[in-house]
Amino acid sequence: MKILLVKPRNTKIKITTQPLGLMYLSSYLKNKGYSEVKIIDMAFISKKKLLEILLDFKPDMVGLGSIISESKETHEIARIIKSYLKECFIAVGGHYPTSLPYECLKDKNIDFIICGEGEKSFFNLVDNLSKNKDTSSLNGIWIRNKDRIINNGISDLEDIIDSLPKPDREGLVLKDYSKFVPHTPILYGLEYADIITSRGCPFNCVFCHNLMGKKFRSHSPERVISEILDIKNKYDINNVEIIDDIFNFDIDRAKKILNMIIDLKINVNLYICGIRIDLLDEETINLMKKAGVKYVGCGLESGSDKLQKIIKKNLNLKKFKENTDSLYKNKIFITAGIIFGFKEESIKTFIETLSYVLKLKIHSIMTAGLRIYPGTQLSNNDKDLISAKNDKGLYTDYFSSHMPLKRNIKTSVQKYLLNVFFYINPHRIYIIFRDLPEKNIRILKLLFVKFIKRILLIR
Ligand code: B12
Ligand code: SF4
């Protein structure tokens, strides 16, 4: 069976990372004997080129992996494929079908959706299809039977994730991703590889969609080191972006990984995107510095203790401040994400956030207006905010992910004020330049443009 895995892209959003989900699926299938698997990332090619590839490769199955903001492109690609290759099966997996299964499977061009973690379920689907076996009751696989949708629940989670083969990095040219702005903007223009060292998050933030479940499941330190060594030795790449939800949830594991990097003298630059700052300690921060951590990205969301409780982030703000001070002392570049637009936000909570953030010794902030995603706790309470159907009423058009569904002047003013007070500060500008791991023209230009856009209110 020939399988083509396609990553649809929302062309309105310029940020792109390597499609790790598809890379995991590809290696899993290859490991099980399905050798004819190809990955295509729509970030690099046009729909016309995709069609050429389709007609040349003639897949029996196309698997699309998408998040909600890519739903429109997902349906468009499914339409193109079905109109040229009628016999080809189309399956969609990822956060989009997992949070909006009925919406997604309503589209008659899509034969299957896979809810939850994809490796095992997708393999079962492919295997059953290739052996002409029944596919109507496979765990995690939903299908349409005439006009009825058969709901087969969420895929069982893989307990020991070291049993999953390393993501297939052969199928893509990793270095080409340096053309795009990555998850970590200060990596822009540099060659880097993405890695995920753990899955799942035990916390309960009301705005977060957690496909990987509530249980923290991690790769062993040995497996993480082996992936980092592959990235360095096989692909000659020295920058590794870790995109876990919480890299440091198991602090002993995090320390062991950092210690191994130090002991084995692996010269690598680490950019950690998902970390809970309040769960760090002094010893780990010192190890981070020694192991080559250049950047941490974290969610702060709010500087108000009251809101922290309401949104169930429950960050310990005192610890957050102490640990960011310590990261700053170690010259590790820190970015914190802040969300405005929660219903409970008041002038008081806004002022608390403003004064808290201005006291932090951090380099950058990313302010966003709340968007309520289906499948999150917030969406269960606020039904009127979740229906963002397009004019055809078929699928959700979450094209501009930073904008709140209901345009909200209060949120925009709050974002603006925080950005102005935060960035118009000579010391901030000094530390940004001082602690930028790479000071190349592309990154400086990007930061400058972002700065001007924020100050001039252009998003
Ligand atoms: C990397 C990342 C990004 C990257 C790339 C996103 C993209 N285009 O896919 C960047 C930085 C660009 C990004 C931006 C955004 N992101 Co983001 N991002 C992530 C992050 C941190 C990791 C994704 C990842 O690689 N995971 C690791 C792999 C192994 O898992 P996976 O991709 O989920 O794949 C597994 C399954 O989903 C499934 N699967 C996936 N594809 C397929 C395909 C098939 C055929 C099958 C069978 C199975 C399958 O099997 C895979 C293996 O088990 C997740 C958080 C998370 N924990 O997943 C958020 C997350 C995906 N992002 C999210 C959001 C909201 C956004 C933004 C809208 C945020 C914003 N306000 O701007 C933007 C939108 C950007 C866009 N292009 O449209 C949400 C999505 C919610 C949703 N329901 O859609 C998440 C889940 C964060 C959260 N917890 O709420 N993001
Ligand atoms: S926002 Fe972060 S800490 Fe909160 S539930 Fe999601 S992954 Fe966990």
Image (cartoon, grey):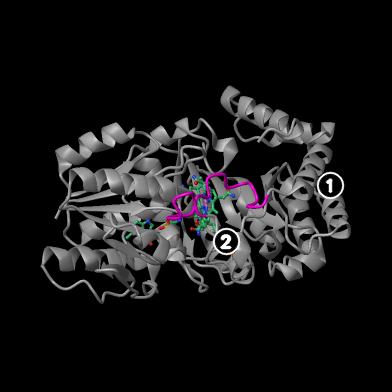
Label 1 CA crowd tier, 10 Å (few <14, some 14–19, many 20+): some
- Please, is residue 128 above or below residue 28 in the view? below
Q: Is residue 377 left or right of residue 169?
A: right
Q: Amino acid at mark 2?
A: Ile
The front one of 381 and 301 is: 381
User: Counting residues from the N terminus, which is met first, the one under dot 1 or under dot 2?
Assistant: 1
Residue 128 lies in quadrant: bottom left
Is residue 269 within the magenta segment? Answer: no
For label 2, the SS is helix
Q: Is residue 416 left or right of residue 54?
A: right
**Looking at the picture, how far across and down is residue 388, in whole percent?**
54, 55
Label 2 CA crowd tier, 10 Å (few <14, some 14–19, many 20+): some
Q: Residue at x 72, y 65 (%)?
A: 315
Q: Is residue 18 left or right of residue 149?
A: right
Which residue is the site of mark 2? 386
Residue 415 is at least partly visible in this image = yes
For label 1, the SS is helix
Q: Residue at x 46, y 37 (%)?
A: 11
SS majority, magenta: loop
Q: Residue at x 59, y 71 (%)?
A: 380
Q: Is mark 1 within 8 Å of ligand 2?
A: no
The magenta span reads 389-406
Question: Looking at the image, which residue sits at the far left?
Answer: 131
Which residue is the site of mark 1? 358
Is residue 391 within the magenta segment? Answer: yes
**Looking at the picture, how far across and down is residue 80, in whole percent?**
27, 43
